Image (cartoon, grey):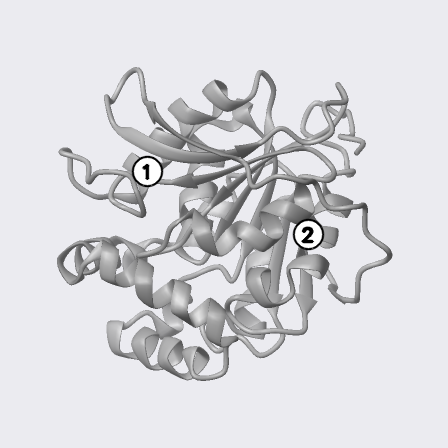
């Protein structure tokens, strides 16, 4: 599968409004999830996008891409339990548990399968969701996916993230710093352990949904060879590389959203394309 490198065509007009932020109680686990929702154009065939953050983060660093995607379809950006505005769960931390939270949440947000987007550790959450709850996922998008098993030590990840932070846009870095402080070091370290151990590449072999892997061309956390490998492991995978770093969805929100919109037009598992 060949990687794609391109810039976006003219995009749809951005949706107005900042979206509604609400707290939802999941019916089975009892966990609380904060969701920012924008309804989109309201056409019956419009896709539904759900955006899932990475380790220590919240929905706030998706704001730019959220606005871009809302011109095409409904968009829901989430704070999973323990992150952002959502309280910490009582039943511990695992990728599988977070996937099950999403498995509960997605039918509450949409009556049909969604375009499920995850950044960094969020790419692990959404991959596991597509494995455990395949009927709720029409398309899968991994942005800056982790963790490359050849670089899976905490030290290597910290060094790569440090190098990246120095060259990201200042306003993006400030969101990261504020969210990390809100998360707190204890919870961050608790979630770091499963992140380093989870084999995204191996689990992608069990995902049937069309899968788009997006990375910034200069991302030191999710490197080129790892992106190629992830796309190759997916049953129906493609790699899209864009100018940017680990926060490519923030610094290049227009191009990232355009790539996601275009990929959402490809045939879903039931054989029917989602047509914006």
Q: Nearer the viewer, residue 113 or 46?
A: 46
- Residue 240: image quadrant is bottom right
| Looking at the image, residue 169 lies above or below residue 250 | below
Q: Which residue is mark 1?
A: 98
The 10 Å Cα crowd at callout 2, few under 14, some 14 to 19, many 20 or more, is many
Residue 213 appears at what percent x and percent y? 61, 56
Q: CA distance from mark 2 to mark 1?
A: 24 Å
Residue 108 appears at what percent x and percent y? 46, 19
Secondary structure at badge 1 equals: helix
Q: Which mark is residue 257?
A: 2
Residue 94 appears at what percent x and percent y? 25, 43
- Residue 85: image quadrant is top left
Residue 6 appears at what percent x and percent y? 79, 67
Q: Please tell me how many numbered marks the rendered image carries.
A: 2
Q: Quadrant of the N terminus?
A: bottom right
Relative to residue 23, is residue 47 drawn left or right?
A: right
Secondary structure at badge 2 equals: helix
- Dot 2 or dot 1: first in sequence order is 1
Relative to residue 45, is residue 126 drawn left or right?
A: left
Q: Nearer the viewer, residue 110 or 19?
A: 19
| Residue sticking out furthest to the right | 10
Q: Nearer the viewer, mark 2 or mark 1?
A: 2
Image point (38%, 23%), residue name: 104
Q: Nearer the viewer, residue 44 or 230?
A: 44
| Looking at the image, residue 197 lies above or below residue 101 | below
Q: Say whether residue 198 is visible.
A: yes
Q: Which mark is residue 83?
A: none
The 10 Å Cα crowd at callout 1, few under 14, some 14 to 19, many 20 or more, is many
Image point (75%, 18%), residue name: 44
Q: Say whether residue 228 is visible.
A: no
| Looking at the image, residue 220 lies above or below residue 264 | below
Image point (81%, 51%), residue name: 11
């Amino acid at each position: 599968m060949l990687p794609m490198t391109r810039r976006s065509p003219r995009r749809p007009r951005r949706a107005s409004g900042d979206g509604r932020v609400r707290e939802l109680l999941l019916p089975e686990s009892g966990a609380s999830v904060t969701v920012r929702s924008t309804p989109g154009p309201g056409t019956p065939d419009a896709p539904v996008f759900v955006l899932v953050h990475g380790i220590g983060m919240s929905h706030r660093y998706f704001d730019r891409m959220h606005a871009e995607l809302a011109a095409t379809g409904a968009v829901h950006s989430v704070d999973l339990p323990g992150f952002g505005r959502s309280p910490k769960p009582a039943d511990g931390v695992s990728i599988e548990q977070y996937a099950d939270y999403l498995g509960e949440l997605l039918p509450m947000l949409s009556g049909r399968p969604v375009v499920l987007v995850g950044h960094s550790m969020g790419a692990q959450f959404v991959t596991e969701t597509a494995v455990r709850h395949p009927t709720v996922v029409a398309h899968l998008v991994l942005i800056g996916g982790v963790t490359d098993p050849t670089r899976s030590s905490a030290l290597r990840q910290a060094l790569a993230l440090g190098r990246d932070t120095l060259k990201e846009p200042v306003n993006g870095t400030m969101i990261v710093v504020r969210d990390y402080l809100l998360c707190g070091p204890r919870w961050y370290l608790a979630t770091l352990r499963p992140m380093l151990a989870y084999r995204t590449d191996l689990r992608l072999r069990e995902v049937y949904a069309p899968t788009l892997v997006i990375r910034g061309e200069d991302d030191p956390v999710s490197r080129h060879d790892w992106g190629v490998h992830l796309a190759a492991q997916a049953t129906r995978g493609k790699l899209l590389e864009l100018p940017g770093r680990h926060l490519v969805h923030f610094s290049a929100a227009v191009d990232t959203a355009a790539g996601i919109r275009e990929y959402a037009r490809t045939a879903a598992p039931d054989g029917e394309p989602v047509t914006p």
